[in-house]
Image (tube, rainbow, N blue to C red):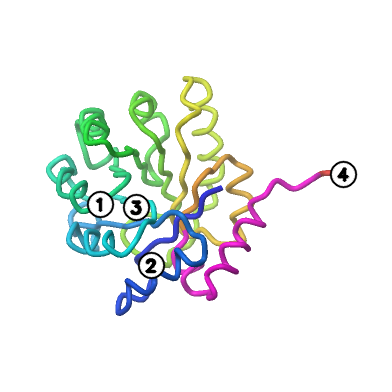
Amino acid sequence: MILSPSLLCADFSRLADEVAALEAASVSWLHLDVMDGCFVPNITFGPPLIKALRFESRLFFDVHLMIEEPARHLHAFKDAGADMLVIHVEADCHAQRTLAAIRALGLKAGIAVNPGTDISAVRWLVQDCDMLLIMAVNPGFVGQRFLPQTLAKVRVAKAMLAEIGATHVLVQVDGGVCPENAAALVEAGADVLVSGSAFFGHKPYADRLKLFAALSRPQSRN
């Protein structure tokens, strides 16, 4: 299991220190939520902030584009230092072309689905992906309640990936992820967990990472 803490829940008055603390705690990924106020009602940040953090960090930048027409901005996010760009199937009518363009830039590519979008919507896209992101809340704001039907959706996604020979595709879950549901998500098939306030609100980060890791290990059944 990979834990990708969501930057939105970090202390924005000292982001460089927060990123350094994550590295010191042996966190390997950082989830960066980019919102445009159109695809989702909130506005967050863009390439300039990501570029500033790139100079401070060696973390894997997992950039979640909650924006309309993401293809227009791929070069900007690559130049800013993104390692992976994840687009929403609901926000791009030519998602396959955009995923191919992301990979052509030398980046990892991901496709995301909202809670109301069936997994079948990305069946013919995942071969062009490195990761499938399943939203466990409706995107746009932090602190929302985890939707329990997400567990079944993760199982369906994992079965679909196996059926079409795309087991290399990671399954990520974002929204309301916490220690209380981490084990169930990993058991359902999640490979990457995004956690915001349930991570950043509990220092020291090294201990929090160890807790998530411990809860996510397969439990023996004697």
Residue 73 visible in image: yes
Between the residue at mark 2 and the residue at mark 1, the CA separation in whole angstroms equals 15 Å
Q: Is residue 168 above or below residue 27?
A: above
Q: What kind of residue is marked 1?
A: Gly
Residue 129 included in the magenta stretch of the image: no
Q: Which residue matches tag 4?
A: 222
Question: Is tag 2's residue or tag 4's residue first in the polypeptide sequence?
Answer: 2
Is 14 situated above or below 175? below
Q: Residue at x 42, y 67 (%)?
A: 143
- What residue lies at 70% left-to-right and 46% top-to-bottom? 218
Q: Disc 4, disc 1: CB below 8 Å?
A: no
How far is disc 4 from disc 1 in space, using C-alphas?
Answer: 47 Å
What amino acid is at disc 3?
A: Phe
Residue matched to label 2: 19
**Secondary structure at numbered mark 2:** helix
User: In this picture, which residue range is highlighted in magenta?
Assistant: 195-220
Query: What's under tag 2, amino acid-wise?
Result: Val
The x, y position of residue 4, in whole percent, is 45, 55
Which circle, 4 or 1, is nearer the viewer? 1
